[in-house]
Image (spheres, rainbow, N blue to C red):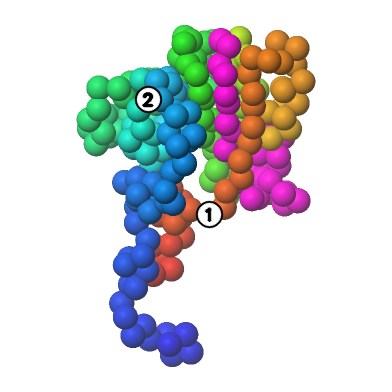
Amino acid sequence: SPATGENPEPHPVHHHIGDPAAGDCHRRGAPREQGVVDFWQGKTVCVTGGSGSFGRAFVRAILAEDVQQVRSLSRGEGLRRALERDVRDPRLVVCEGDVRIRDSLLPLFSGVDVVIHAAALKDIPLVERNPWSAVETNVIGAHNVVEAAIACGVSRVVGLSTDKSSAAATAYGGSKFVMERLFVAANLDPRACGKTTLVCTRYGNVAYSSGSLMPKIIA
């Protein structure tokens, strides 16, 4: 019990929560509407931060759809190799790229229909010690994604944000708040009007994602 520190059933959370990297969230999702299935058909999708916790789960999930190609973009060589090893699908192309360098995105976004922007620096203690690192990746990186997507005529761009951007109290939350504003404002850019639609979505803490406290809580 909480009062004594005893746990009548050791690690009960494991019975209900899966590894997001294994696509568990996709398998447990509600039945998909036909419009969703049709939307992805034949699309070429690029995922920035594709070898991160969310990126891996999304790559697995989207490959379950009738997409033409999925490009996973990330900086970490080890994580890229792990994704290639774990996900064997000829439609997956694992790419090296850095959202902080705009020109590196242009060839990767060429011919892409949908960009999922998941690349971010989200280690809050690290960002508090070095706020500029969050500016480079989460703000300038987001701006580069927006600019490259518009330049390449990408139809849809989805930016992943966080609940910590609301009434931000940390450098990380503040950087994601600015990222959201960059995405929203870009819809007013004459170059984007009628060609590129940019949206953001916020999500909270994801169990067993990189930096998750869940393993420590149930230990």
Q: Cα distance, mark 1 to mark 2?
A: 28 Å
Residue 108: image location, x then y, percent:
45, 14
Residue under numbered circle 1: 205
Q: As displayed, is residue 4 above or below residue 69?
A: below
Report if residue 44 is visible in the image. yes
Q: State the image quarter where residue 67 is shown.
A: top left
Q: Does the magenta stretch include residue 175?
A: yes
Report if residue 74 is visible in the image. no
Q: State the image quarter where residue 126 is shown.
A: top right
In the image, the segment drawn in magenta is: 152-179
Q: Quadrant of the N terminus?
A: bottom left
Q: As displayed, is residue 143 above or below residue 87?
A: above
Residue under numbered circle 2: 67
Residue ID at (34%, 73%)? 12
Amino acid found under the numbered disc labelled 2: Val
Residue 168: image location, x then y, percent:
72, 49
Q: Which residue lies furthest to the bottom in this view?
A: 4
Residue ID at (68%, 46%)? 165
Amino acid found under the numbered disc labelled 1: Asn
Helix, strand, or loop for circle 2? Answer: loop
Helix, strand, or loop for circle 1? Answer: loop
Q: Are marks 1 and 2 in contact (CB under 8 Å)?
A: no
Q: Who is closer to the viewer here, 206 or 123?
A: 206
Residue ID at (33%, 72%)? 11
Is 149 displayed left or right of 52 in the figure? right
Residue 208: image location, x then y, percent:
40, 54
Q: How crowded is mark 2: few (under 14 residues within 10 Å), some or many (20 or more)?
A: some
